[in-house]
């Protein structure tokens, strides 16, 4: 449905709600990026965060903190929403949806939208499942076709209720021409050293153990290779596997980084080794935009960006030997790596450019409001 001229030009009052307690995590960062983009398109945008220690990148957005697990904060949120009269409420992740859904029962919201970022099935019962299937929730934005397909085919949502809008990246931050030399110097890595990276919280589903198994095979062929592990978590949990593989001297744990564009530029290969829980891994699009070759497991929507042997390499989940082979192929054949990165940059600009995402989501908002207005007139 197209937007009427009046609707498309309307300045919307939009509320974005994140359930992340860590505002540096991918979903929260994506919400902040969207909020800033919608603000730059002329809308009034407010953000709610779940008691984060620090709201990174939110300034100068209008941000409020609520504890999404407290009934008293739900009532306070309800009172505030009634007073502010938002045109749009857009929740990110299931806990935010549950909070917003319950807090606004009985309150008419012109457009109520939620973001779905994983291929996990909806719960078999409970408020989240009720919310997804309710008429109160107008639309679901899936971050990949794999997520949309899961919602429609496995959870039974009506196809017209779900749209795919890929997550975005900021082209002013992530682009070719960035230098990773400062990052390499920080970790005493020479310009010639092959450096392979993995980015993500140090949790089981991200596949770090598989990555280390593959790394050990890479080192047998390229002893000079080094492996940069970026993300929050306890590196001690990997001490035993690194010792068993004799890999400790080759692995650098960098922790959380605020200079991700330069970190990605410092890498010769970026690997996503995830085993489950993904929708579409955000660091892939950022690496592709920077011009870093990528390897990913065949999981969720990652293959919608990383097309095997066209924009990167795809390997089966848990296939450490195949992962090592793909890494070595990229490290040894620079001509092929360059060919892949050119195609990858074009694909990520086509699907994930920030301005495109903001325009698509704005259109969804306006279509919902227009459809409801027409229904009201017709009744």
Image (cartoon, rainbow, N blue to C red):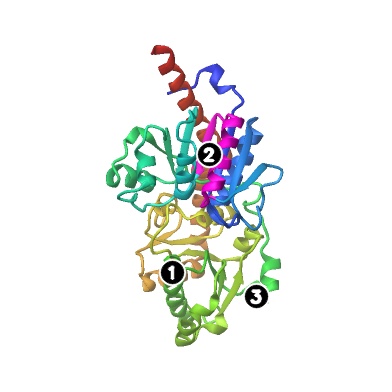
Which region of the structure is painted magenta?
Answer: 68-91
Q: Is residue 293 above or below residue 222?
A: above
Decide: marks 2, 1 in contact (CB < 8 A)? Answer: no
- Find disc 1 in the rendering and name its residue: 204
Q: Quadrant of residue 24?
A: bottom right
Tell me which label, 2 or 1, sits earlier in the chain. Answer: 1
Q: Is residue 223 above or below residue 90?
A: below
Q: Is residue 69 left or right of residue 304?
A: right
The quarter of the picture where the N terminus appears is: top left
Q: Which residue appears farthest toward the top when viewing the image?
A: 378
Quick one: SS at disc 1?
Answer: helix
Tell me which label, 3 or 1, sits earlier in the chain. Answer: 3
x and y percent of residue 351 in the render? Answer: 49, 43
Quick one: SS at disc 3?
Answer: loop
Q: Nearer the viewer, mark 2 or mark 1?
A: 1
The residue depicted at 65 percent of the width and 44 percent of the height is 63
The residue depicted at 39 percent of the width and 46 percent of the height is 128
Q: Nearer the viewer, mark 3 or mark 2?
A: 2
Q: Is residue 74 magenta?
A: yes
The residue depicted at 59 percent of the width and 22 percent of the height is 10
- Find disc 3 in the rendering and name its residue: 189
| Cα–Cα span, label 2 and label 1 | 30 Å
Q: Nearer the viewer, residue 280 or 374?
A: 374
Q: Is residue 353 left or right of residue 163?
A: right
- Find disc 2 in the rendering and name its residue: 357
Tell me which label, 3 or 2, sits earlier in the chain. Answer: 3
| Cα–Cα span, label 3 and label 1 | 27 Å
How many numbered marks does the figure carry?
3
């Amino acid at each position: 449905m197209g937007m009427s001229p009046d609707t498309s030009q309307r300045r919307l009052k939009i509320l974005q709600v994140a359930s992340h307690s860590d505002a540096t995590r991918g979903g929260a960062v994506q919400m902040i990026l969207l909020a800033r983009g919608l603000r730059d398109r002329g809308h009034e945008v407010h953000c709610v965060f779940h008691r984060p220690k620090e709201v990174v990148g939110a300034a100068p957005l209008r941000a409020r903190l609520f504890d999404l697990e407290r009934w008293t904060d739900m009532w306070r949120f309800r009172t505030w929403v009634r007073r502010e009269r938002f045109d749009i409420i857009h929740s990110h992740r299931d806990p935010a949806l549950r909070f917003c859904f319950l807090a606004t029962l009985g309150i008419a919201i012109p457009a109520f939208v939620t973001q779905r970022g994983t291929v996990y099935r909806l719960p078999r019962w409970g408020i989240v499942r009720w919310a997804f299937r309710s008429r109160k929730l107008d639309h679901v934005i899936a971050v990949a076709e794999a997520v949309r397909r899961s919602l429609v085919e496995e959870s039974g949502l009506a196809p017209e209720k779900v749209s795919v809008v890929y997550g975005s990246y900021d082209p002013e931050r992530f682009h070719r021409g960035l230098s990773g030399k400062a990052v390499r110097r920080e970790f005493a890595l020479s310009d010639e050293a092959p450096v392979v990276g993995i980015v993500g919280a140090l949790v089981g589903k991200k596949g770090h153990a598989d990555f280390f198994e593959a790394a050990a095979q890479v080192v047998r062929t390229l002893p000079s290779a080094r492996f940069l592990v970026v993300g929050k978590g306890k590196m001690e949990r990997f001490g035993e596997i690194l010792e068993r593989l004799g890999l400790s001297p080759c692995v650098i744990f960098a922790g959380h980084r605020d200079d991700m564009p330069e970190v990605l530029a410092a890498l010769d290969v970026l690997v996503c080794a995830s085993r489950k829980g993904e929708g579409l891994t955000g660091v892939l699009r950022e690496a592709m935009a920077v011009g870093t070759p990528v390897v990913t497991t065949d999981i969720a929507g990652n293959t919608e960006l990383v097309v095997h042997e066209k924009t990167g390499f795809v390997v089966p989940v848990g296939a450490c030997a195949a992962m090592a082979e793909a890494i070595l192929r990229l490290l040894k054949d620079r001509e092929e790596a360059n060919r892949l990165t050119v195609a990858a940059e074009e694909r990520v600009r086509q699907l994930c450019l920030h301005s495109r995402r903001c325009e698509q989501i704005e259109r969804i908002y306006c279509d919902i409001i227009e459809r409801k207005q027409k229904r009201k007139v017709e009744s």
